[in-house]
Structures are given as C-alpha cells and as structure tokens.
Image (cartoon, rainbow, N blue to C red):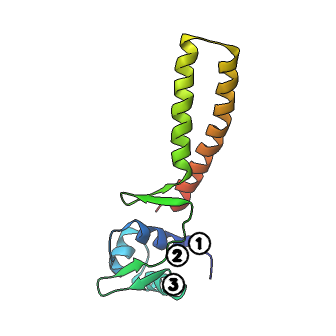
Amino acid sequence: MESLTGTRRKIYYYLMKQNGPVPLRRIQRELDLSSPSLVLYHLKKLEENGLVKETTEGYVVTKVILADYIKVFNVLVPRSAFLVSFLIASLALLWIINLINPYVVSLFASVVIAIPTGIFIVDVVKKYNEIRV
C-alpha cells in the first residue's frame, strides 16, 4: 500500500470527517482542488488500496488507518489529547493547591507534570496539523 501524502491524504482525511457518502465535485469544491479528474485519480488510488469505495451517492471511507485518532462528533481527535487534558487539569489543580499551602514537593510535582504536559501538547498540535484540511 502506498503511503498517504499530499492531496491523497487531504482527500482521505476529508472523507473521514464526513457522515456519509460525498460526491466527487463536492470534494473538489470543498478542498479547493484544480479539477474533478485530479480528485478522481486520487480517489481511484485510495480505492485500489481498499481505503474508500464508491457508492451511488459518492465516496465513503471503508478502512480506518488512523490508529492514533478517535472520531468525536465528526472531529478527528488524537488519543493523546485526552491525556493532555488530564495533565493540564492536574497541573492547574496542583498550582491552586500550591497557592494555598506551598511546599518544595509542590514545586517538584509541578515540574514533573509540566514536562510531559509540554511533550504531549507538542504531539497533539503536530497531529492536528497532520489532519488539517
């Protein structure tokens, strides 16, 4: 199977976000692609790889290859976003507790939580940029 890059990736991610079949011309229009034949070429390649199929109403995704993503209300969310949310909430709570009763251990805990939080924020931003259409 060929890797998903460029226009093919854009089309695949776009179809992933849709609720149902999408006609070829709508894909072209919404992704601002130059011609229907360009869209058709990439759709046929995706179809050859078993990732999409053509129905009477348009094209739909048949195989999900985004293991690191979860679809929530038609939005692709990186799995690590949930961990980032937890870490940000933990860090905020720790800082609030630190204001009330500051100890050296609180500073240490802040650093320990801040480092993975920063790492995961970078990961989430990177993954959102990968699927941006």
Give the residue at the far top of this rendering: 101
Q: Quadrant of the N terminus?
A: bottom right
Q: Could you tell me which residue is drawn at 66 percent across and 39 percent down? A: 116
User: Mark 1 — residue?
Assistant: 5
User: Mark 2 — residue?
Assistant: 8
Q: Secondary structure at mark 1?
A: loop
Q: Could you tell me which residue is drawn at 42 percent across and 81 percent down? A: 35
Amino acid type indicated by mark 3: Gly
User: Mark 3 — residue?
Assistant: 50
Q: Nearer the viewer, mark 3 or mark 1?
A: 3
Q: Residues within 10 Å of mark 3 (few under 14, many from 20)?
A: some
> Toward which corner of the image does residue 75 lie, by quadrant?
bottom left
Q: Secondary structure at mark 2?
A: helix
First in residue order: circle 3 vs circle 2: 2
First in residue order: circle 3 vs circle 1: 1
Whether residue 26 is situated above or below residue 73 in the rendered picture: below
Where residue 5 appears, as percent x and y from the top left, is: 59, 72
Q: Could you tell me which residue is drawn at 54 percent across and 18 percent down? A: 97
Amino acid type indicated by mark 1: Thr
Q: Is residue 62 visible?
A: yes
Amino acid type indicated by mark 2: Arg
Instruction: Give the CA distance from mark 3 to mark 1.
Output: 16 Å
